[in-house]
Image (tube, rainbow, N blue to C red):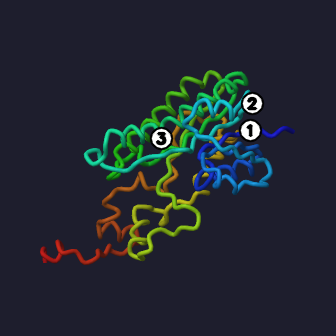
Amino acid sequence: MTRPTAVVTGAARGIGAAVVEALVRDGFDVVAVDRDQDGLRRFTGTANVRAVTADATDATAMAGVVGAGPIAALVNNAAAYRRGALHESSAEDWQATLAGVLKPVEAATRAVLPAMLRSRSGSIVNVASVNGLVGNPGHAAYTAAKGAVHALTRQLAVEYGPHGIRVNSVSPGLVLPEGEDGPDDAVDRALLVEPYPLGRVGRPDDVAEAVAFLAGSRSAFVTGVDLPVDGGLVVTSPAAVVSTGLRAAWHRPPLHYRDDPRRQEDT
C-alpha cells in the first residue's frame, strides 16, 4: 500500500523535526523542508523522509518542492520573527515579522492546494501560538501575525471544506528545544512553569502528537479549529498563579520573590 505524502516546513529542529518523526510513525512519507541545510542532515538515512533545502517563504520554491503531488497533508511550521513592543520596534521589524510568520503559510498552502483540489482531499495544519490568543510583552508583531494565522485557518477551512480539504491549527505554549531545561538560575526555572496547571512547559513531542492527530484520518470530521497545546496556560486565571489563597487551593506554596528594593521600601 502506498504511503501518503506529507510536507513539513521548518523541519530542521524543534517542533518541526518532532512532527516529521511523528508523521513517519503514523505511516506518512514526509518531505522535510527547511532553509537550514545543516539542520536537515539529522534526517540523513532516515527511511520515508526526503529532506529538501528551501525557503518556505518562496512560493516558486515551494511549488517546486511539492510538484504535481499528490499531497495528503501539509504542516506549516516555518516562521521567523523579531521581538519588540510596538514603540520599540521599527516599521521594518514589523513588516519582517508579518512576512516571516504569514508568508510561509501562504506560500506553502498555495503550493499544495492544486494537488489537494484535484484529489478532493487533504489536511493542512498551521502551527500558530498562544501568542495569537493572549498578549505577551515585547511581541507586538508576532502576536498580530499569529492571530492572523488563526483567522486564516478558519477562512481556509470554510473556503476549502466543500473540496474535502480540512484546515486546523495548533497553538503551543512555551516549548523548550531538545536538550534544554530552561534558565540556568533555579528560581527562574521554577517560575517558568508557574502559569502551567500541568506543572511543566512543553516539549516538541507534545506539539507533534497533536499535529499528527489533526493531519491524519483520526480527525476526519475536524476542521476550522485551533487546539492549544499549552498545558492549560490560556485557561488559567492569573490570580491562580499569584494569589496565596488560590495557590493553596491549587496545592502550591506561596510565591517568594527575590530581594526587590521596591518591596523593601514598602516595608
* Residue 57, quarter of picture: top right
Q: Position of residue 80 (x, y in %)?
A: 48, 46
Task: Identify the image quadrant of the N terminus.
Answer: top right
Q: Earlier in the sequence, mark 1 or mark 2?
A: 1
Looking at the rendered structure, the kind of residue marked 3 is Gly
Give 125 or 20, whichever is nearer the viewer. Answer: 20
Q: Which residue is mark 2?
A: 70
Does residue 209 show up? no
Classed neighbour count for the residue bearing mark 1: other residues with Cα under 10 Å, few (<14), some (14–19), many (≥20): many
Mark nearest the camera among 3 and 1 is 3
Q: Residues within 10 Å of mark 2 (few under 14, many from 20)?
A: some
Q: CA distance from mark 1 to mark 2?
A: 7 Å
Q: From this view, report whether residue 160 is shown above or below residue 95.
A: above
> How far is disc 3 from disc 1 in space, using C-alphas?
25 Å
Q: Name the foreground residue: 105 vs 36.
A: 36
Q: Which residue sits at x=44%, y=74%?
A: 184
Query: Do the residues bearing badges 1 and 2 touch, measured as CB atoms within 8 Å?
Result: yes
Dot 3 or dot 2: first in sequence order is 2
Q: Which residue: 48% across, 36% down?
A: 102
Lateral position of residue 163 relative to residue 150, left or right: right
The residue carrying mark 1 is 5
Give me the disc on residue 100: 3
Residue drawn at the location 45% of the way across and 37% of the way down: 99
- The answer to whether residue 188 of the structure is visible from this angle is yes
Question: What is the x, y in percent for residue 41?
Answer: 70, 55
Q: Amino acid at mark 1?
A: Thr
Q: Earlier in the sequence, mark 3 or mark 1?
A: 1
The residue sitting at 36% across, 75% down in the picture is: 253
Q: Nearer the viewer, residue 62 or 255?
A: 62
At numbered mark 1, what does the secondary structure look like: helix, strand or loop? strand
Distance between the alpha carbons at the discs numbered 3 and 2? 27 Å
Q: In the rendered view, tell whether residue 50 sits above or below residue 260.
A: above
